[in-house]
Amino acid sequence: MARRASISLKREVALTAKRVLLGGQKLVYVLVIDRPTKYRWGRSRILYIGTTKNGSSHVAQSVAARADDILQRHGIKRFHARIITCKSTPKDKELGQT
């Protein structure tokens, strides 16, 4: 006789995605962990800094690719991807970079 599988729904959310309006601009994103990690110049919660022209799809791919490595670190239970943008400068406009 086959046994029934015992399943349970976890209370915590595993993944959340949110639409962020970026207007097709290049952006920088950071992966931020829930506790500071040591670097030779000090401590920081920022674990990775990346840049993309492809928008949020590249950010999602980066999160997926790095999730196992990040979550295997001692004491790390969660991390977030944050987007950093800035207004273009007059020099960027001269060079054709927006």
Image (spheres, helix red, strand yellow):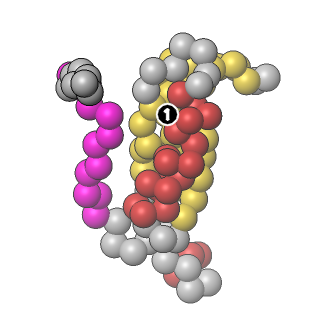
Secondary-structure class at tag 1: strand
| Vertical placement of residue 3 versus 59, above or below | above
Q: Residue 93 at what x, y percent from top left?
A: 52, 81
Residue interval drawn in magenta:
11-21
| Vertical placement of residue 69 versus 8, above or below | below
Q: Residue at x 52, y 38 (%)?
A: 67
| Vertical placement of residue 92 versus 94, above or below | above
Q: Where does label 1 land, which residue?
A: 32
Q: Residues within 10 Å of mark 1 (few under 14, many from 20)?
A: some
Does residue 35 appear anywhere in the picture? yes
- Image quarter of the N terminus: top left
Q: Residue 72 at what x, y percent from top left?
A: 59, 25
Q: Nearer the viewer, residue 17 or 72?
A: 72
User: In the shown orientation, is residue 33 left or right of residue 44?
Assistant: left
Residue farthest front in this picture: 1
Q: Nearer the viewer, residue 96 or 19?
A: 19
Q: Residue 80 at what x, y percent from top left?
A: 42, 36
User: In the shown orientation, is residue 24 left or right of residue 29?
Assistant: left
Give amino acid for label 1. Answer: Val
Q: Residue at x 44, y 71 (%)?
A: 25
Q: Residue at x 26, y 27 (%)?
A: 2
In the image, is residue 1 part of the stretch drawn in magenta? no
Picture quadrant where residue 73 is located: top right
Name the magenta segment's main secondary structure.
Answer: loop
Q: How many marks?
A: 1
| Vertical placement of residue 60 versus 69, above or below | below
Q: Residue 66 at what x, y percent from top left?
A: 57, 43
Q: Residue at x 29, y 58 (%)?
A: 20
User: In the shown orientation, is residue 60 left or right of residue 49?
Assistant: left
Does residue 5 appear anywhere in the picture? no
In the image, is residue 15 part of the stretch drawn in magenta? yes
